[in-house]
Image (spheres, grey):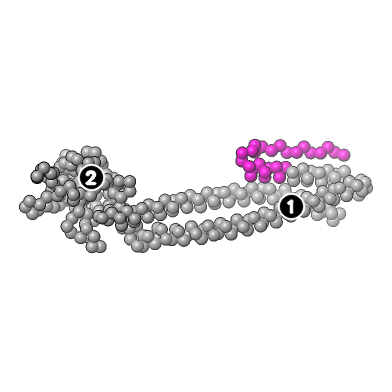
Amino acid sequence: MKENKTEEMAMTESQESKPEKKGKRIALAIINTIINILIVVVLVISVLVATVALTSKSDPNGLPNIFGYTFEYVQTNSMNAESPDGYEGGNFSDQDVIIGKTYSPDAFPDLNVGDIVTYRSPMLDADGNVMLITHRIVEKKVVGGESVFRTKGDANSVIDQQSEGQYLVSADIVSVFYTDKYHGKILRNFAGVFRTVRSQQGFFLFILIPMIAFFLYAIIRVIISAMNYKKDKAEEEKQEAVEAAVAEALAEKDAQKPENMTPEQIEQFKKFLAQQEAQKAEESAEDAPAEDESTDSPEEPADE
């Protein structure tokens, strides 16, 4: 009787463990997917922050440049007004980031009145760097065979080059924001984020901390993998021991004639062994996606 109870408990435990294992696998798959998505998002942000920081340092004007596109946070409200009649592309404030394109005379040979450009100013910003100003061209003329310009903010009442004979030359222009060839984009209310990204705090927040987190995550994954391996190994050994014990008991019962084991008990043992084989086949199919997932259940042995 004791042997029969032990064997029945083993069969019940095996039947209950199958859905539980499946549920755990689904939960772990969902958790791993979410974690992987978060890792990709953080990694993309870190790469962008690192690129912005490195290009800002390498550019003589401190202007981040990614594949020829410049990113500049607006420093004043001089363009925070409706564009003059017949013109477009303005109306951005000191809360915004504008995306321009690197200027070269070959790429933009025909700058005209109404275009918006970013140029180096003789003034310095709060950090002691050369201030970059993005204004609209309001006057163009040719001096000594070279085009020169005067600019003005749409919200300002006076032009930038007020002194007599003072003009903006091509060498002063670093990027173009709005022309017939290129229409720049405005990232509204991103100036604060951009300033943070370019600061030391931004480097610490968006690069250093994610690197530390990735390192710790990798260590945790290794530890969890080792623990799961040991757990799976122990369960496998336990299962093999149960199967061996059942097989041995069945062989002993078969050898001892029917007076010690009824036909129903024998049939129960055989069903249990068949379930074990089916479970093994199903797990093998799940571990090998290339194989056919549908595994035929072994036929039940005929009644004796």
Numbered tag placed on residue 139 in the rendering: none
Residue type highlighted by circle 1: Gln
Among numbered discs 2 and 1, the one appearing first in the sequence: 2
- The Cα–Cα distance between marks 2 and 1, rounded to whole angstroms, is 73 Å
Q: Which residue is mark 1?
A: 239
The residue under the point 71% across, 52% down is 236
The residue under the point 40% across, 52% down is 47
The residue under the point 91% across, 47% down is 255
Q: Which residues are magenta?
A: 278-304
Residue 189 visible in this rendered orientation of the protein: no
Position of residue 15 measured from the top left corner of the image (x, y, whole percent): 72, 48
Position of residue 110 measured from the top left corner of the image (x, y, whole percent): 18, 40
Asked if the stretch drawn in magenta spans residue 299, the answer is yes
Q: Secondary structure at mark 2?
A: loop
The residue under the point 57% across, 57% down is 222
Numbered tag placed on residue 104 in the rendering: 2
Report the magenta stretch's main SS. loop
Asked if the stretch drawn in magenta spans residue 160, the answer is no
Residue 106 visible in this rendered orientation of the protein: yes
